[in-house]
Amino acid sequence: MEFLEKNGKLIAGAFFALIAIGLIATFISNSSKKNEIETQEKFSMIELDYTKYKEEMTKSIAPQTPSNPLVKADKKADGKDSFDAAAKAEKMRAPLSANLSKFISENKKSVATEMAALYLSEILLDEKKNVEALEVLKKVDSQSNDLTSVLVQKKLGSLLADNNQCEEALKVWDKLLKLSTAKFAHSEVKIMQSLCYQKMNDLKKAEEILISVKNDKTEGSAENSQHAERILRLIQFKKASGT
């Protein structure tokens, strides 16, 4: 009791301070959610334009199949449709890229911003601008472990590897392999790692990784397991033939 009497004011002060901290944390959390919702709303129209752009890109490279399987496809019509779709996509590309770039520069640390960066990188890749696509993803602040951040980091690693920066790519992928939220992508990431180790002439490490993917029997891993086995056979063939 003596302690309580002497330190009552101090304890009460600390108690109310904790309440204040809790209220501030709640306010920040609610404010953050509100900002994210507002940012998502601003992004929705740009995302719709991106969806339309990707639809035209898909039409431009995929031959049209008739709804009736007995009707032969008209190659001339298919060619015109593909040409028209490519022209539409080309017309949409510049303004869409500008809107995405503007959105990214005006909105930091947002899930919508991460998605915008992914979309912009895809458009740049459509234009064969790999270096520019890489720079876009490098600038994104994706420190959280949510799904969008995982997709950004996975794509970043892939572009680093494509631009002959395998050591940096491996660092990015190593971080992803430690995240439980990235578990759905672990097998695919490991396969990409193995390809990098091949580039670096570390075939032993590449084989170790591919064997682990090949032997993975978890649900949904069959396709990656088969892919790993194909790459593994190719490595072993090269080693046997001395190429």
Image (cartoon, helix red, strand yellow):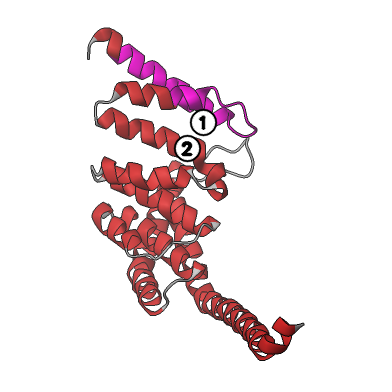
Q: Position of residue 97 (x, y in %)?
A: 35, 69
Q: Quadrant of the N terminus?
A: bottom right
Which residue corresponds to the image point at 24% horizontal and 54% vertical from the top-left? 131
Which residue corresponds to the image point at 46% horizontal and 51% vertical from the top-left? 58
Query: Residue at label 1?
Result: 224
Q: Of residues 64 and 29, which is closer to you in this image?
A: 29
- Quarter of the rendering containing residue 190: top left
Q: Position of residue 167 (x, y in %)?
A: 27, 41
Q: Position of residue 141 (x, y in %)?
A: 40, 66
Which residues lie in the magenta part? 210-238
Query: Residue at label 2?
Result: 188
Which residue corresponds to the image point at 33% horizontal and 21% vertical from the top-left? 204
Q: Which mark is residue 237?
A: none
Q: Earlier in the sequence, mark 1 or mark 2?
A: 2
Horizontal side of 129 relative to 15 (left or right) equals: left
Q: Amino acid at mark 2?
A: Glu
Q: Of residues 129 and 227, which is closer to you in this image?
A: 227
Horizontal side of 218 relative to 102 (left or right) equals: right
Q: Amino acid at mark 1?
A: Asn
- Where is 145 relative to 201, above or below? below
Give the residue at the far bottom of this rendering: 9
Give the residue at the far right of this rendering: 1
